[in-house]
Image (cartoon, rainbow, N blue to C red):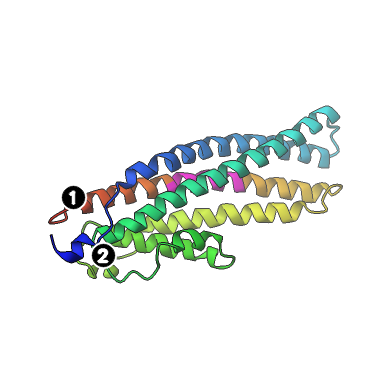
Amino acid sequence: MSREASLLPPFISPRNTARWPLRLLVLTIAVAWVAVGVDLHDVWLLVNALRGVEVDTALRQGQFETTGWMFWIQGILCLATGMAFVTWLYQARVNIRALGMRRMRYGRDWCIWGFLTPVLNVFRPYQVVREIWKASDPTSLDPFQWKSLPTPWLVLLWWGTVLAAAGLRLLAVLTSLGADVNLQKLVLSGSLTLFADAALGLAAATSIFVVTRLSDAQETKWALQPNPQT
């Protein structure tokens, strides 16, 4: 074994760290579609009120409480899922060194700070995942040639759905501010929340594909190494 090879970090199967994010992503999809049902009922009640139809006060209060609970459940779930996803992504980035790839632009710390830094978190996570994906591609074992590989459409779709879900949620929150007695604003806010929850479900679904396919790619590339360390 060469001295350079002995200094490489050990390859850790990304499938091991993928278990929790995958489970939480499936749960996120399920909760998101339950939330879509809650949102539909909320919008229906608001539209009826806007049309002048009398809405039972107890029904409206129950809807308000259910919507609030869904908001907090989704918030906690998204936080837990995000932490699990970042843990998996960090290990996938560490594995790039074990796979022998060189000239990475973004260090492993960007797997964390890319999501936390304001403004940068609009595009840096996409750049980090795109780079890890290309460096993990088993069609190129050359330490430098991976840079010329094309960007996969799945990564673009994944980040597009994530931004759509986050953007729609932000718009829904901003629209709801000061809309307590404005039914039109409440209908708009409820509709945006509905679309945000649907987008969240799609974002979680595309994230599952990203996690599974990237993990499989690293496993395949590791198996193709001339002298893989065990």
Where disc 2 sits, the SS reads loop
The residue under the point 56% across, 55% down is 164
Q: Sequence order check: which comes first, mark 2 or mark 1?
A: 2
The residue under the point 21% across, 59% down is 139
- Can see residue 141? no
The three-letter amino acid code for the residue at tag 1 is: Ala
**In the image, is residue 202 part of the stretch drawn in magenta?**
yes
Query: What residue did someone put label 2 on?
Result: 101
Q: Position of residue 5 (x, y in %)?
A: 19, 62
Where are the magenta residues, as a range?
196-207
- How far apart marks 2 and 1 lie (CA) works out to 15 Å
The residue under the point 22% across, 56% down is 138
Query: What residue did someone put label 1 on?
Result: 223
The residue under the point 52% across, 59% down is 115
Seen in the image, is 36 located left or right of residue 146? Answer: right
Q: Quadrant of residue 9?
A: bottom left
**Front residue (pair 67, 230):** 230
Seen in the image, is 53 located left or right of residue 91? Answer: right
The three-letter amino acid code for the residue at tag 2 is: Met
Where disc 1 sits, the SS reads helix
**Front residue (pair 73, 110):** 110
- Can see residue 102? yes
Badge 1 local density, few (<14 within 10 Å), some, or many (20+)?
Answer: few
**Front residue (pair 15, 168):** 15
Whether residues under marks 2 and 1 lie with C-beta atoms below 8 angstroms apart, the answer is: no
